[in-house]
Amino acid sequence: MNKTRVVFMGTPDFAVPCLDILVKEGYEIVAVVTQPDRPRGRGQKVTFSPVKEAALMHGLEILQPKKIREPEALESLMALQPDIMVVVAYGQILPKTLLDLPKWGCINVHASLLPKYRGAAPIHWAIMEGETLSGVTTMHMDVGMDTGDMILREELSIDPDMTTGELHDALQAMGAKLLSKTLCLLLDGKAPRLPQGENATYASMLKRDMERLDWTLSAQQLHNRVRGLNPWPGAYTTFQNKNLKVWRTKQIDSALTELGGQPGEVLAMTENGFWLATGQGVLELLEVQPESKRRMTAKEFATGYQVKPGMILA
């Protein structure tokens, strides 16, 4: 076993491969810190975080302080005397007391090419902003929000139709491998400290009003919004006064879009769904989900709900 004493801090499934690789590589994980159990879903059933599920599977000690700054939480972590702390999407900002505790410091794995998209939702925002390049960065943590010196970065191209879920899965695997390389460098005393430089951007938490599609936006913006909110929380519009989730779209070649129509108007039926007018350009709906129904192709929806040119989605 690697005798390096590691405290791992993380919460969502993005962090799980990082915990798994530390276990696989034999690090001595003295505790896993994750957010408290919370009620979720329609039934408000109390559920564990994905990291807690993984920690239980590995038989690791678990700490779930409500606030990491609580004196009891700080005392518990100090008593563990970790050599290093690895933080992956934990969900709370660490106080300086903790940052200064391990002799090798605190290392973070962040799902963006810093300094772009610091903050809570870097994967969602990279897709919604139409980025063509993303990646993972490891860094030495400091007291700022994702402002620490970088150690390693690895890039990944974003396909024009890639969703947040697909990018998440690709970066999740990449992050674990980059963490492994980072720890090897760090424990050999060879980890660089690369300042992030200027031109930072911030990926704020998602808001509910972002989920409703505004058809006055351009077809490109709407396409990015739909794939950026897939699979969570999902984008929606309304059809005949009921919510309609929109899961997949396609931006139509501008040469084919001289059809006019007001934003949100159904322009034409197609082989795979139907075309809608937007503020600029035409968007084809490919996969939707009527309220309280299953997901279906837009073609199935158009047939079942008798969608016709001239109808309006709002």
Image (cartoon, grey):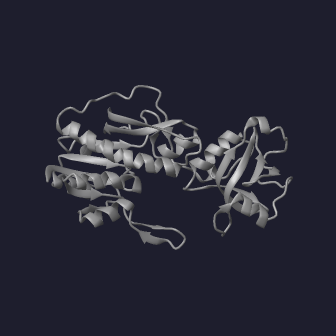
**Residue at position x 32%, y 51% from top?**
18
Decide: is 141 above or below 51: above
Decide: is 237 above or below 143: below
For the N terminus, the image quarter is bottom left
Front position in the image: 284 or 98: 284
User: Would residue 161 appear left or right of 167 to someone viewing this image?
Assistant: right
Front position in the image: 40 or 309: 309
Front position in the image: 287 or 194: 287
**Residue at position x 72%, y 48% from top?**
284
Decide: is 268 above or below 221: below
**Whole-percent x, y for residue 223 in the image:** 65, 45
User: Would residue 103 appear left or right of 143 to someone viewing this image?
Assistant: left
Q: Residue furthest front?
A: 271
**Residue at position x 35%, y 59% from top?**
51
* Residue 282 can be seen, yes or no: yes
Front position in the image: 10 or 14: 14
* Residue 148 can be seen, yes or no: no
**Whole-percent x, y for residue 101 in the image:** 20, 44
User: Would residue 305 appear left or right of 81 to someone viewing this image?
Assistant: right
User: Would residue 292 appear left or right of 194 to someone viewing this image?
Assistant: right
**Whole-percent x, y for residue 175 in the image:** 36, 45
**Whole-percent x, y for residue 47 in the image:** 41, 68
Give the total of numbered labels: 0
**Residue at position x 84%, y 41% from top?**
259
Q: Residue furthest top?
A: 198
